[in-house]
Image: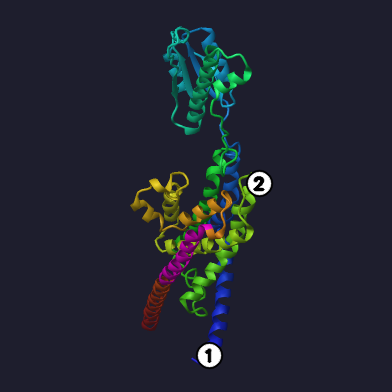
Amino acid sequence: MSQEGLLHTIIEGTRDACLIWRDELRQVFKDEGVLIFFILVPLAYPLLYSWIYNNEVVHEVPVVVIDDSHSQQSRQFIRMCDASPDVRIAYYASDMDEAKMLLGRQLVKAVYRIPSDFAAKLNRMEQAHVSVYCDMGLMLTYKAAYQTAVLVSQEMNSEIQVKLSGHYTAREEQIQKRPLDYDSIPVYNPAGGYGSFVLPAVLMLILQQTLVLGIGLSAGTSRESNRYQDLVPIQKHYHGTFRNVLGKSLCYFMIYGIMGTWLTVVVPRLFHFPCLAQWFDLLMLMLPYTLACIFFGITVSCLVRYRENVMLLMVFVSVPLLFLSGVSWPQSNIPGFWQSVSWLFPSTFGIRAYVRMNSMGASLGDVLTEYRMLWVHVFVYFLIASLVYRYQIEQARLHALERLDFLRHKRAERLAEEQKE
């Protein structure tokens, strides 16, 4: 091919890709369902999730107490638990049946039972026990109720040891209570809260899921209505698989360039989540991640025959993808088979890289493995998406030819009937 022919092909391809981008953008804003997943959900869901978990930790968990001891020591234990920030003594019960009734009605989340021999054992220098029954339906309330009981019992143990030690100075008593002093400093999560822990991963997953849902919804609409202009826009003017893929991808990338900035930059700062990533490093990460999600969404769209299919598919895998990312469950404890399955999704490497950069202060070089894998996803899914579109274009042409032959046949039959009349 001569240089003039090559230049003409490039110019024509660029023009066609821009026209496809224009038509795809127009169709996106005409489809209310696609607009919901492309605009409304990425804007609203992060605000809703972040607002719900903005308190970070659970405080004032309601607890019912069964005090069979009725002693000074049992009342001290109850007062110290009630004074803690995580537990609130809401009810007193006379027996376990009454406490179970309160627990079943969800009026309390835990039961503290102090036995009748609690004070007697302490006075005889024997080991006493306090029974803790927790509602395991929510791990955050279980943690608050159980840890409060443990910390209060440890504090009372220290006070008993000080009284029996026979020391004369406050410093000696302090050493007796805490021989080995230490400071607990939460790393990468200063508030020690659930929001800062899991929300960054959820934000990245929302970006992938809404993008795939929107693309799949658009493809499902086209198949339901038997309109192939969406797959091959103005077929007589646009030729070439790459032009169609690049044109559509340009439309999605333009929209999610804005949505990605909202999810990864604006929302964490609105709710004061850790934001340690450098701007350039974050931009370099979001570029391959957004492209990989776009091409992955185009690939998934070939499986979508009806609009509802993509919603059932992607909503079903959302929670498993969050676990497979290694944030909610340690990556080292995920079986090898499921780790291999997680490599098929861009969110796995996008979440890991984003959490390490934005929450732990890692640089782009520290997440180089995840960064390279995202670029692998970009090229692999681009090739698969091109093959998918190639197949859809051929199917569209066959459908158009069959429709044209059918219309010609009907017209010929009508003309033959008119001539007979």
Considering the numbered disc 1 on the image, is that residue within a helix, a strand or a loop? helix
Question: Can you name the residue that lies furthest to the left here?
Answer: 337
Q: Nearer the viewer, residue 27 or 282?
A: 282
Rendering coords of residue 101 (x, y %) = 44, 18
Q: Residue at x 52, y 60 (%)?
A: 289
Q: Which mark is residue 78?
A: none
Decide whether the magenta segment is chiefly helix, strand or loop: helix
Distance in Å between CA atoms under marks 2 and 1: 53 Å
Q: Residue at x 51, y 78 (%)?
A: 238
Q: Nearer the viewer, residue 421 or 145?
A: 145
Rendering coords of residue 355 (x, y %) = 54, 50
Q: Is residue 376 visible?
A: yes
Magenta stretch holds residue 306: no
Q: Is residue 107 visible?
A: no
Magenta stretch holds residue 385: yes
Amino acid at dot 1: Gly
Mark 1 neighbour density, 10 Å: few (under 14) some (14–19) many (20 or more): few
The residue at which mark 1 appears reads as: 5
Magenta-colored span:
366-388
Amino acid at dot 2: Leu
Mark 2 vs mark 1: which is more N-terminal? 1
Q: Quadrant of residue 260?
A: bottom right
Rendering coords of residue 160 (x, y %) = 52, 14
Q: Residue at x 53, y 87 (%)?
A: 6
Measured along the vertical axis of the image, is residue 203 above or below residue 84?
below
Rendering coords of residue 31 (x, y %) = 55, 59
Please state if 407 lies on the left or on the right of 177 as rendered: left
Q: Nearer the viewer, residue 392 or 96?
A: 96
Q: Nearer the viewer, residue 302 or 60?
A: 60
Q: Which mark is residue 270?
A: 2
Considering the numbered disc 2 on the image, is that residue within a helix, a strand or a loop? helix
Count the marks: 2
